[in-house]
Image (tube, rainbow, N blue to C red):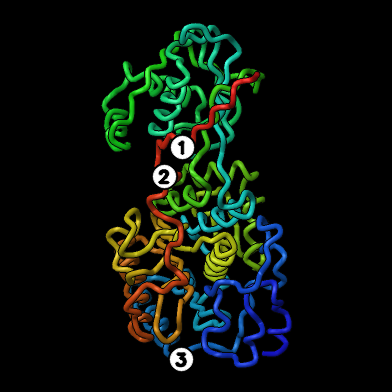
Amino acid sequence: MLSLLSRLTAATLFDVSLAAGLVPGLLNFFSPPQRLTIKDPVGISRRISEPWAVLRDSRDPQAEVIVQGYLKSLKALGLSTKEQGVWLQSGLFRLADHQGQTPLSAASLTKIATSLAALETWGPQHQFATDVLTNGTIQNGVVQGDLIIQGSGDPMFVWEEAIALGNALNRLGIKQVTGNLVITGNFVMNFEWDPIKSGNLLKQALNSATWQAQIQVQHGKMTAGTPKPKVAIAGNVVRAQPTQGQLLVKRKSLPLWNLVKRLNVYSNNFMSEALSRLMGGPPVVIKTAAAAAGVAPDQIRLINGSGLGEENRISAQAASAMFAAIQRYASLHQLNIADLFPISGTDVGTIEDREIPRNAVVKTGSLSVVSALAGVVPTNQRGVISFAIINRGSNLEGLRASQDTLLRKLQQAWGAPTKRPVEISPIAPAQDEMVKLGTMSRNFVPAPKS
């Protein structure tokens, strides 16, 4: 015990001055750090020498009985237990595991790795900018030249964002463009990879005279009274290399933490893959996530950033470790794991019809023969339990139901809190104007040159 504690410095996870008492819950990764001065918050978890240590003699007999019963039920269905992974941990204490360190096809648990790597790379408040420029002049509301869109990779530039951009141009008095709509940089819209298709979607959104029913519906979800933009572009949509021009408007994306929350709630493959590509692809995601979580890189084997494909393989321990690393990182930025992943009983998306214990914070994963679930579940006696369950089998509904039952049995064994624990309660205001799609507050217009 003492040798382990000696490796945990006061600048990492705990207030080690409390260590002498070894009170229950001391070694809890879901406790906020104390007396920590942050000088370089992005990448700070890389400096934690041993972020995911495990006391190997800490198995819980009650947990092991429940897990063994779970595995027997899977075996009775004809499933191979070698293809099922389970990991349960409370703080540094491993409670039970089965094939916990074996990389298994993990489907969208891959998004945990992508989320962690993205937060480490950019920081939770990072915003991707979409710049609107022109190479021409503006006379009487008409741009005599091209309208240039220079993207930097906003993975959620959708109808509402385009409408806000069009309204910003209208506020500048711009109503027409005589030239082309030129797409440069990394610009994607409505989860469409092709820059020309994305450009045509933007061209349509900027001019409400060309709107179809789908845009009308999305506009109706925006703040009451939101204007309908009218910027008519005479030319075509063309692709070009980044070019110089007069900056008209800078549109900033939702903050990264909110992008991460949205992609995890709905398990959005496009958004996760877009972030992965921006970082440099699977090798970079693996290296960054493994280092931050303190697991061996060979426990995270990825072919993309979304989890599509059985070749994406993650161990149950690594999935749980990455979740804990995200919580530690989030707590340094006045955020919480619940600000980044769906909350059972509160959020919808992939957990809407599940029977997961209330207030658990989780990430789901599904392929045709894979069902996975990882996250944290609150209990009275054991505090916040970190878990990962990875199953291989074709009866996905049955596997999901079994996962939910396993978590409920664990919570029943250790007691269900009457209130959501502070450690896993959202901190960021859900109604913040900055995280509303289409808000004008994320438009920035440069001051005119004197």
Q: Residue at x 58, y 49 (%)?
A: 303
Q: Is residue 183 above or below residue 411?
A: above
- Give the side of residue 8 with respect to residue 101, left or right: right
Q: CA distance from mark 2 to mark 1?
A: 7 Å
| Label 2, residues with CA under 10 Å away: few <14, some 14-19, many ≥20 | few
Q: Which tag, 2 or 1, sits closer to the chain's start?
A: 2
Quadrant of the image containing the C terminus: top right
Q: Residue at x 52, y 73 (%)?
A: 30
Q: Residue at x 58, y 27 (%)?
A: 446
Numbered disc 1: secondary structure: helix
Q: Which residue is mark 1?
A: 441
How many numbered marks appear?
Answer: 3
> Which residue is nearer to you in this view: 89 or 443?
443
Res 84 visible: no
Q: Amino acid at mark 3?
A: Pro
Q: CA distance from mark 1 to mark 3?
A: 54 Å
Q: Amino acid at mark 1?
A: Ser
Res 48 visible: yes
Q: Residue 61 shows which numbered tag?
A: 3
Q: Which residue is mark 2?
A: 433
Name the front one of labels 1 and 3: 1
Numbered disc 2: secondary structure: helix
